[in-house]
Image (spheres, helix red, strand yellow):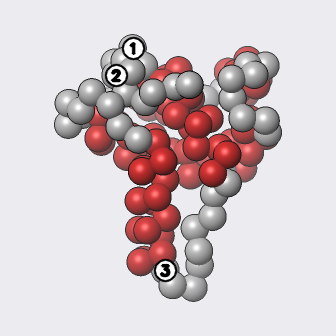
Amino acid sequence: MREHEAEQHNMTKKQIDAHGQDDRYPAGFFRWLPKNSTVYREFERRALQMARTRRKRYSARTIIEVMRWDSDIADTETTFKINDHYTPGMARLFMATHGTAYPKFFELR
């Protein structure tokens, strides 16, 4: 991981608080995020992997479903759970962080 990506990868509390005032994110997203940062980091990793293939657009929901699939295959004892309401928040956060490099990668409504 490049140094500037590592810096973007770790959001500070101030950044989270600033985004938390934004009503475009799902209610409760920025309370959920610190406790589930591993989920977001994996989402971000996979989105970057796909974006680097030079795709112009992709589906955030597809990434989440693949994460669920992989989790279920790897560990039949544990089910990967994520509230679908937070998928748009992850897409928005990705675009806020990486949108300059990958404009319009996720369609935000």
The reply to whether dot 1 and dot 3 touch (C-beta < 8 Å) is no
Residue count near mark 1 (Cα–Cα under 10 Å), binned few <14, some 14–19, many ≥20: few
Camera-nearest label, 3 or 2: 2
The reply to whether dot 1 and dot 2 touch (C-beta < 8 Å) is yes
Residue count near mark 2 (Cα–Cα under 10 Å), binned few <14, some 14–19, many ≥20: some
Kindly identify which residue carries mark 1: 100
CA gap, disc 1 and disc 2: 6 Å
Using the image, determine if residue 48 lies above or below residue 42.
Answer: above
Q: Is residue 30 left or right of residue 41?
A: right
Query: Residue drawn 45% across and 27% down?
Result: 107
N-term mark: 1 or 3 = 3
Using the image, determine if residue 6 lies above or below residue 86.
Answer: above
Kindly identify which residue carries mark 2: 102
Please tell me whether mark 1 sits on a helix, a strand or a loop: loop
CA gap, disc 3 and disc 2: 33 Å
Query: Residue drawn 63% across and 57% down?
Result: 82
Please tell me whether mark 2 sits on a helix, a strand or a loop: loop
The picture places residue 89, in percent across and down from the top left corner, at 62, 35
Kindly identify which residue carries mark 3: 75
Q: Amino acid at mark 1?
A: Thr
Mark seen at residue 76: none
Residue count near mark 3 (Cα–Cα under 10 Å), binned few <14, some 14–19, many ≥20: few
* Count of numbered marks: 3
Q: Amino acid at mark 2?
A: Tyr
Q: Is residue 80 left or right of residue 101?
A: right
- Residue 88 in sight: yes
Q: Is residue 54 left or right of residue 59?
A: left
